[in-house]
Amino acid sequence: DTGVSQDPRHKITKRGQNVTFRCDPISEHNRLYWYRQTLGQGPEFLTYFQNEAQLEKSRLLSDRFSAERPKGSFSTLEIQRTEQGDSAMYLCASSLQLPGPLVSSYNEQFFGPGTRLTVL
Amino acid sequence: QQQVKQSPQSLIVQKGGIPIINCAYENTAFDYFPWYQQFPGKGPALLIAIRPDVSEKKEGRFTISFNKSAKQFSLHIMDSQPGDSATYFCAARRDSGNTPLVFGKGTRLSVIA
């Protein structure tokens, strides 16, 4: 399977614990996005990377959240001191951003299956 | 502030019917409008997308209608099938720079035989 993969698929933790999720994008995709989806809502943007550089962070990304993409390939999302309000599906997506301002960036974002986090 | 408003929240149609899902946006800088389909336990998958220089786009049984002046766009599913039962999300983004997507809240579609 050459799509976006995420690990683990499910995580149950107790409030106050730290959790880390991993995303492996489609090979050669240079953009990687993290979204959060709560029940009955659409995905909400958290942060994204161009290669290893973190380009933008949403206001949703509190100080307890940190994301990395150290070698420009896989990414990790860590949540410290989890709260019940962190319970959600965490989605990763990747895309290929072509160079040049005139090149159409009509580039599809391919989503992974998500990691469902439950904080007790 | 919700930048993309989607309706209805849920929809039930008979097999062969034509469900219509509507979205409205506020940010005039948006210039790429995709629709995603999501099945339970799966991530969203791109269904069809449109740019505002056209008013309609068809791909198979799926059609997007776009009204730039009204800042509205809609998804029509022709000859709907039980396998189309899923949650559908409209989204928008500023196409320049492949920026993150802004999603609507979703429409849960049920197609009954």
Image (cartoon, grey):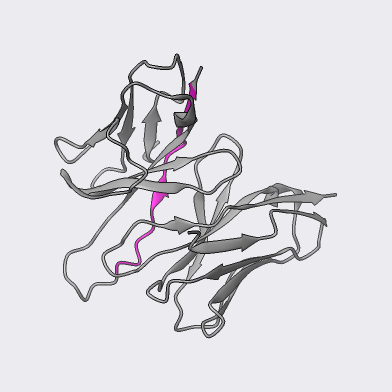
Q: Is residue A87 left or right of residue B85?
A: left
Magenta stretch encompasses residue A70: no
Front-most of residues A77 and A62: A62
Q: Residue at x 38, y 53 (%)?
A: A109
Q: Position of residue A4 (x, y in %)?
A: 37, 39
* Viewer can see residue B79: yes
Q: Is residue A109 left or right of residue B63?
A: left
Front-most of residues B33 and A102: B33
Q: Which residues are magenta?
A: A105-118
Q: Position of residue B56 (x, y in %)?
A: 57, 79
Compared with A29, B40 (above or below) is: above
Magenta stretch encompasses residue A113: yes
Q: Residue at x 46, y 79 (%)?
A: B52
Q: Quadrant of residue A35?
A: top left
Front-most of residues A20 and B53: A20
Q: Residue at x 57, y 75 (%)?
A: B72
Q: Is residue B107 left or right of residue B31?
A: right
Compared with B38, A18 (above or below) is: above
